[in-house]
Amino acid sequence: MLSTLRVASRSAAAREANFVVLGARQASAWSKVPQGPPDAILGITEAFKADSFKEKINLGVTTRASPTFFSSVRAAEDKVVASRSDKEYAGITGIPAFTNAAAELAYGTGSAVIKNDRLVITQTISGTGALRIGGAFLERFYPGAKKVYLPNPSWANHNAVFKDSGLEVAKYRYYNKDTIGLDFEGLIEDIKAAPEGSIILLHACAHNPTGVDPTQAQWRQISDVMKSKGHFAFFDMAYQGFASGNADQDAFAPRHFVAEGHNIALCQSFAKNMGLYGERVGAFSLVCENAEEKKRVESQIKILIRPFYSNPPIHGARVASAIMNDPSLNEQWLGEVKGMADRIIEMRSLLRTNLEKLGSKHDWSHITSQIGMFAFTGLKPEQMDVLAKEHSVYATKDGRISVAGITTGNVQRLAESIFKVTG
């Protein structure tokens, strides 16, 4: 019996030894995967959370003034839940009641491209999903060079989305660090210099991250130059209504381009203007030459979407649809959007006023001339470091701040902190 136990023990030890040797020989399939860089915004949030100072300020993310608290959105959601609708799949291009309303919001009620059945539109996984579908379609079918020109700077995710779509990414001048404003001459020069038929990405309103937008007169000139060069306009509209407080005014650029004969692509997000961040509600649309072309393009959009995610989620789209299709809820929502936009405009004014009252020698007019949720302060990376370390004010190193994080309760301390850092 003892002999048998010894043999079994030796046998188990041998198996274990063989397993160890085998394990040493077979490296993990993922052993060569490199460590990715940390997310800049996540790092700001972590540093903010770790700070024990009671009056700390987080301007890296949209923490306050969030549209999540819109009563119109809550009412619409209650309406959707009360309807006890089914949970069946939406079609590949989403819920028609949503996409039809999204198209009218973007292009205008009575838009000719909608009336003449020239618009392809699909529900997407928010604005990012819209960009990804658009990028994939252009990579597969755009007849020109597979290169997209982004403003410098642009939303950080634009670069990754288009590269992963298989497109080459280039840049055109947009922001002038010296004036803390639009480099319009550089923008026009670069668009003129781009090869004919280039894909140009344009922020429809509330440029992220600078908050610097062209004027309507400048938009008209950009349209003329792009038309003369045969460029393709690819609009990203993530803040409609949330920039100026007027949804029609914020859609001026894409509507003007369409009126001038551009067959544009347009990405919409309902994250900010309805507070549907986690619901991931968006739309991608493409203006076609005629109804027959639309039919072919739509068939290919469906083919692209099918292996991506088959069909989009329904709850958030139903909420957005309930808001846009109910005249009473829609009026209430537009009023609340304006209220949020007005609050942000007020915070910009208060920050500038407080800085000027402190006797700052700098020109802070750019704070109020910029628009939307973000502002480029003009502060340098080393100044942003001092703001965080010595004043517990957290934002990205490029000097961008989220105006949504400014309140009547912290704006004075924020101005004092910026004044101490800049003089």
Image (spheres, rainbow, N blue to C red):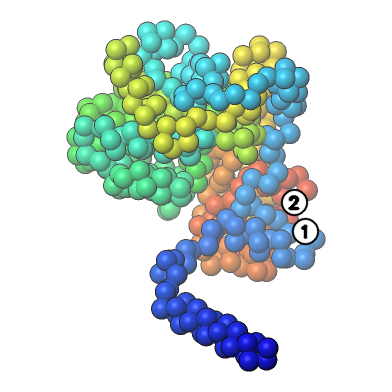
Q: Quadrant of the N terminus?
A: bottom right
The answer, for residue 356, to whether it is visible in the render is no
- The residue positioned 76% from the left and 19% from the top of the image is 82
Q: Position of residue 365 (x, y in %)?
A: 55, 44
- Residue 368, how many percent across, how many down? 58, 40
The answer to whether 140 is drawn above or below residue 110 in the figure is below
Task: Name the residue carrying label 2.
Answer: 410
Looking at the image, do the residues carrying marks 1 and 2 touch, with CB atoms under 8 Å apart? yes
Of the pair 312 and 20, the residue shown nearer to us: 20
Does 291 sit left or right of 414 as displayed? Answer: left
Q: Amino acid at mark 2?
A: Asn
In depth, the one of 146 and 420 nearer the eye is 146
Mark 2 packing: few (<14 Cα in 10 Å), some, or many (20+)?
Answer: some
Which numbered circle lies on residue 55? 1
Q: Tell whether 375 sits left or right of 255.
A: right
Q: Earlier in the sequence, mark 1 or mark 2?
A: 1
